[in-house]
Image: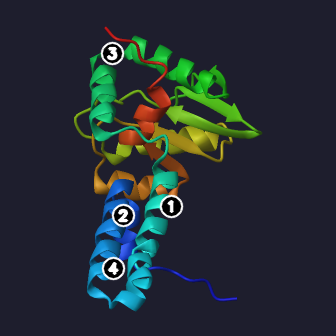
Amino acid sequence: MPSFKMSDKSLFAVLLRSPWWISFALAVVVGAACYKLFPDRFAIVGALSGLPFAVIGGIAMWKQRGIPNPARVDATLQKLSALSAREFASALEAAYASDGYVVAKVTASGADLSVTKAGRAALVNSKRWKAATHGVEPVRELSAAMEALDASQGVYIAVNALSDAARIFASKNSIRVMQGTELALLMKNATTPR
């Protein structure tokens, strides 16, 4: 059976990526405008014309639940940047443990931790998490550690941006880059005010 794929540029796709309240506001505006513009006998139909936007708003609200606002993400990332390497490593271990992972330190070059949950294991590299730029070399080191320790997945943690070459290498080698909102969500319970 063929699957339906919505264009990333369609109005509904854009609304799904936007804050959920925009869709609900649009539903009210479209419904009210059509209610006023339609003849009296079709006024109810006009009012219901905003319903698709309300449905999109509900879907967006469901998808965005639990995602902190950008200001909170920035505040968490600022706190993380202020931590020393040792404090960050401890906070990272605590964050994974509180998320239900079994955490073990790794002594192999290119990886810091092994995290396991529900039978799935991954190696985590956070050595250069605060670097201004991340090139492909530390990602290659993680890949080599994955091969040496027979790990099928890797996680590269970075506060700042990775080079295009590093991103491409990571995506081709089963390495997930964790930064921004995803990193803030993982670390939200492990960071403490300084």
Callout 3: 10 Å neighbours few (<14), some, many (20+)? some
Colour setting: rainbow
- Amino acid under label 4? Tyr
Q: Position of residue 81 (x, y in %)?
A: 29, 23
Compute the Cα span from label 4 to label 1: 24 Å
Where in the figure is residue 115, as x and y percent of width and height? 63, 31
Label 4: few (<14), some (14–19) or many (≥20) C-alpha neighbours in 10 Å: many
* Outermost top residue: 194
**Point 49% across, 40% down: residue:** 66
Please name the residue shown 55% across and 18% down the image. 94
How many dots with numbers? Answer: 4
N-term mark: 2 or 1: 2
How far apart are labels 3 and 4 at the CA level? 56 Å
Query: Mark 2 is on which residue type?
Result: Ser
Residue position marked by numbered label 2 in the rendering: 23
Which sits earlier in the primary sequence, circle 3 or circle 2? 2
Task: Give the residue type that dot 1 points to.
Answer: Ile
Instruction: Tell me the residue that label 3 is attached to.
Output: 83
Q: Of discs 4 and 1, which sits in the foreground?
A: 4
Q: Which residue is mark 4?
A: 35
Please state which of residues 151 and 84 is positioned toward the viewer in this rendering: 84
- Mark 2 surroundings within 10 Å by alpha-carbon count, few (fewer than 14), some (14 through 19), many (20 or more): many
Using the numbered discs, state the Cα–Cα distance from disc 2 to disc 4 in whole angstroms: 18 Å
Q: Secondary structure at mark 1?
A: helix
**Of label 4 and label 1, which has the lower sequence position?**
4
